[in-house]
Amino acid sequence: MSKKTLIIVPAYNEEGAIAGVVENIHKHVKDADVLVVDDGSRDRTARKARENGAMVISLPYNMGIGSAVQSGFLFAKQKGYHFAVQVDGDGQHPASEIPRLLTALEDGSDMAIGSRFVHSTNYRPPFLRAVGIKIFSFLVSLIVGKWVYDTTSGFRACGRRAIVLLTENYPHDYPEVEALITLHRNGLRFVEVPVEMSYRQEGKSSISAKAGVYYMLKVTLAVLVAVIKRRNGR
Amino acid sequence: MMEIATHLRVIIGILCFALVGIIIELIRQNRLKEHYAIIWLLTALIIFIFGIWPDSLNIISRLVRLHHLTTLFMVAFLFLLAIVLHFTLAISQLFDRNKRLTQEVAWLRFELEQIMQEEKA
């Protein structure tokens, strides 16, 4: 595997977890560069990441997970990386599964999603979240024309074509579901790779109960809009 | 025929000229972009037309079959709606550009730090 790989780690106030995350990535993926995108953290996230041998881009203010990851895509695009893998800075994405995502890209997919639901895994989301996940799965499957089980997983690997596309077109918050439609609309292929995810070690989900309603509305609307949006470059 | 009292016409006229004056002054001071000034100058123009030619309101009223006062409010409301839509478009565009700018700045700062470190070493 001689192709250049960038691991993008978006992190917001993750000084407790970031060192372990970076360390784990280095342990499991030998020949990849790690880029921590510090999304306007107020703690020592950036320093801890640097101390553990990651490159760090610090955003001047908290821009949201989508914009943070997109900063990573921009970096990957400019620096000519072939693959970019998103691994969340809170430690819930297993670095040990990254090589399997990359293998899926080598096999010709434009994006590989680390999916929690293809096979039954140990992950059990709370009831309301489970309902939301099901709804999006149904919606996306309907549009894409094949079953997509885990549309909200942020654990993803992108090939060059997806990197270039998403650098131009990626929502600033709750980007996961919409990005799938964007890919599909532009003729890119994605596959799901079953992975086992651990529970988050530090911090909370980016989606609180109150934000849940906004999340559902925003993402549903975004998906419907993405369907009628013009394709890039047209 | 709808009659508007002369003093009302004078007030409307003064209002229009004041609005135009303020807009031109704001452009002159570089506080208002010409692009956005157009919509305000248009506003002044429309108020002016209603002022000197009140019958135009009657014509619209007959067209939409509403009382002329209701028509006035409807026209004003639609116009404000258009302005707000215009602003939302402007904000959306600014948001996208601001985002890309921030991302590029963060990336350039990274590059700069790399170069400075290499020079030190």
Image (spheres, rainbow, N blue to C red):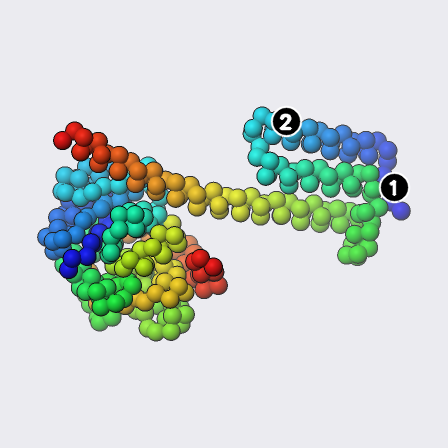
Residue A234 sits above or below residue A191 on the image:
above
Using the rendered view, name the quadrant where residue A12 is placed: top left
SS at badge 1: loop
Give the total of numbered labels. 2
Q: Is residue B51 left or right of residue A212?
A: right
Label 2 sits on what residue type?
Glu
Identify the residue position indicated by label 2 in the image: B25
The residue that label 1 is drawn on is B3
As measured in the structure, the alpha-carbon distance from the residue carrying label 2 to the one carrying label 1 is 34 Å
Q: Position of residue A7 (x, y in %)?
A: 21, 52
Chain under disc 1: B
Image side of residue B79 versus residue A83, left or right: right
Residue B11 picture location, percent across and down: 78, 31
User: Which quarter of the image is occupied by the N terminus of chain A?
Assistant: bottom left
Disc 2 versus disc 1: nearer the observer? 2
Is B36 left, or right, of B120 in this rendering?
right
Amino acid type, residue under disc 1 in the picture: Glu
Q: Position of residue A93 (x, y in %)?
A: 20, 56
- Residue A108 falls left or right of residue B8: left
